[in-house]
Amino acid sequence: MQITKSEYTTSSPSVAHCPAGERPEYAFIGRSNVGKSSLINMLTAHKGLAKTSSTPGKTLLINHFIINNSWFLVDLPGYGYAKRSKKERQRLRTMIEAYILQRWQLANLFVLIDIRHDMQAVDREFIDWLGQSGVPFSIVFTKADKLGSERAKDNAAKWMASLGDTWEELPPYFITSAEKKTGREELLDYIDGINSPGADKVAEDD
Ligand code: GTP
Ligand code: MG
């Protein structure tokens, strides 16, 4: 799939403020600084579309970006950032949970994991909650450029295996680098497959 147009739409303080309409959307979540905003810029090939920062805690609202005038990418704040006040953490948690549970336009949630890290409790708890809540999600490993490609593959496989301790059926996963544009085609094709179900089949039948 080609992205021909990507534009900032809105920043919403709650799910009630998110854009109206029926367009499907794809949101990015994960710990602060994991690379959510950078991945959106990489996918759209639009530098500076989503604001990034080397300091965790940059994204604080629900940011919608309209793609090809037909679907949205959504940048969410990170979870598990200890340096925020308790009140601010609670506000973000409530906002993110309400968005995930109530936003029926959410076609898939991408959960981002730094490929260098072992399974952490905060990620496991979040993923267990997604599974129990029946939210469609997949895993995206980020910053693969920080490891060699073999080690990146090994770490991702190991991480998925530890998810398999509690989950019988594992979600799809992707290995990416915003820096090197790794995984771009795979992610865009995956989104395209959800946006246009059956399109592959039609092509095969022709
Ligand atoms: P919050 O909005 O604060 O939750 O962070 P975020 O998850 O949106 O992370 P962001 O995209 O702002 O990136 C955080 C830092 O990681 C920045 O310094 C990025 O340059 C860096 N970064 C993101 N993706 C990659 C990547 O693929 N490779 C490398 N080497 N650095 C990356
Ligand atoms: Mg961000």
Image: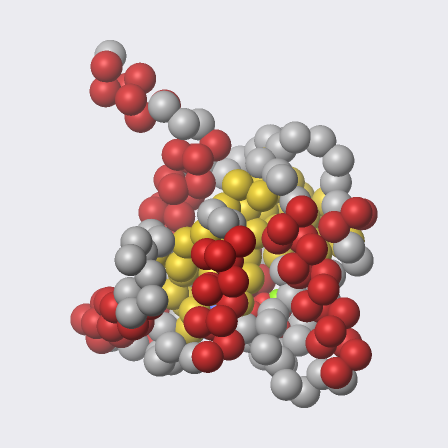
Report the coloring of the rendering: secondary structure
Q: In which quarter of the view is residue 176 placed?
A: bottom left
Left or right of 163 on screen, residue 106: right
Residue 156 appears in the picture as rendered: no
Quadrant occupied by the C terminus: top left
In the image, residue 10 sits, relative to residue 198, either above or below, namely below
153 sits to left or right of 170: left
- Residue drawn at x 71%, y 68% is 92
Residue 23: tell me if it is visible.
Answer: yes
For the view shown, which residue lies furthest in the bottom direction? 83
Q: Residue furthest top?
A: 206
Residue 76 is situated, as x and y percent measured from the top left of the image, at 63, 60
Q: Residue at x 71, y 76 (%)?
A: 89
Image coordinates for residue 88, horizontal then vertical, percent: 77, 76
Q: Using the image as rendered, state which of residue 136 and residue 179 is in the foreground.
A: 136
Q: Is residue 85 above or below residue 73?
A: below
Of 88 and 19, nearer the camera is: 88
Instruction: Locate residue 10 relative to residue 199 in the image: left or right.
Output: right
Q: Measured along the vertical axis of the image, is residue 69 above or below residue 59?
A: above
Q: Residue 91 appears at what percent x and percent y? A: 76, 69
What residue appears at the point 63 percent right and 85 percent down from the top-left corner?
82
Where in the figure is residue 78, as x and y percent of width and height? 61, 70
Quarter where residue 116 is shown:
bottom left
**In this figure, what is the number of numbered marks?**
0
Q: Nearer the viewer, residue 6 or 171?
A: 171
Residue 4 lies, with reference to residue 125, above or below; the image says above
Looking at the rendering, in which quadrant would you find the N terminus? Answer: top left
For image coordinates 28% across by 65% down, the residue present is: 164
